[in-house]
Amino acid sequence: MSVRILLLLFLLMTCGVRAQGFAGLGTDAEGFSVPEPGRELVFPQDHGPHPDFRIEWWYLTANLKDENGADFGLQWTLFRSALRPTAGKGWSASQTWMAHAGVTTGEDHFSTERFSRGGIGQAGVTAVPFSAWIDDWRMTSLAAPGNDSLSALRVFARGPDFSYDIALTASGPLVLHGDNGLSVKSASGQASYYYSQPFYTVTGTITLPSGRFTVSGRAWLDREWSSQPLDPDQTGWDWLSLHFDDGAKLMGFRLRSRSTDAYTSATWIEPGGKTTAYGDGVLKMTPGRVRRVAGRDVPVEWRLQLAERDLDITVRAINPQSWMETLVPYWEGPVTAEGSRRGQGYLEMTGYE
């Protein structure tokens, strides 16, 4: 997502900082840069890292099918976190890196993660030419000269029981969320810079214990950075990206709070890339069927309503047991959408205990 940074809990565990809000994302941002209205996002520079901000990620999800029509979901994420506002070098560098990868089928869910300290070459991101990596996991630009560097990518990751190697080509523009890329996350004004490339077509291979599969489909890349994206009272979120069969797309999230109503936000994306942003309360996200997942009660079915677009749909998990067994565990997996529109996409849910 956007708001999806789980990395800071790793920071808190390693540095002994007291958590505020979910995973400490409401922690005071003193000394770090913070998102401000009026800043124009600049490309390709903003495809790269922003070390003066505390947290950042490059987040890819994909809905795929094999040659027999079986469904697969795929996730590749690289998180960056700054331990302190000063830079440092080598092992003293202030940047830490964490990566997550996952593959989901209708019957199985596989996940793994990796960690690195910045400054030693094991992990990092460069804007020009674009490349993001940790160990041998890679997200690398294949774009032709003159095109946006995220318009074509190759992505690779592997874990103990899976691997994938895919190529992505974008057929539409980058999308800015919120107010020209400033995405507000709470009534008290916490925010992040947030943009996406939601127009990828995908081809490639996935290797699982059951065999090697040739797959194709659609993918969505999120880019987001901030220093205090959540209010201290917020406890977790429910985030969705959806590709509808008519070419329209939707990003929406609901941030849950201990003491107030959930805060919502959405971006409607037309087939040609034109966007409409919807602020708090416009998108209605109502949890439905609940399943017991990893010892937690998790809603794996949702009703989404966006009256301004005559949208009333039910979103269902392809595999309700899509639990990421990572240092900070969470639910992440592919979904289908039925109702006033049909489609598919990805759902992420955090903070369920």
Image (spheres, rainbow, N blue to C red):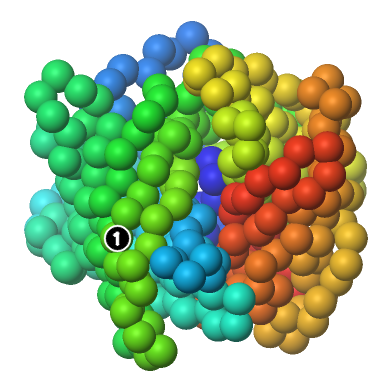
Residue 58: x and y in percent read 37, 47
Q: Is residue 217 above or below residue 295?
A: above
Q: Is residue 229 above or below residue 319?
A: above
Quadrant of residue 307 in the image?
Answer: top right
Outermost residue to the bottom: 209
Amino acid tagged 1:
Gly
Is residue 233 among what the camera can see?
Answer: no
Quadrant of residue 28 in the image?
Answer: top right
Q: Is residue 23 above or below residue 34?
A: below
> Which residue is drawn at the image coordinates 40% and 22% (left, top)?
173
Quadrant of residue 280 in the image?
Answer: top right
Residue 239: x and y in percent read 66, 48
In the picture, measured across the screen, residue 52 lies left or right of residue 118, that is right
Numbered marks: total: 1
- Dot 1: element: strand
> Which residue is drawn at the image coordinates 43% and 13% (left, top)?
39
Residue 75: x and y in percent read 44, 61
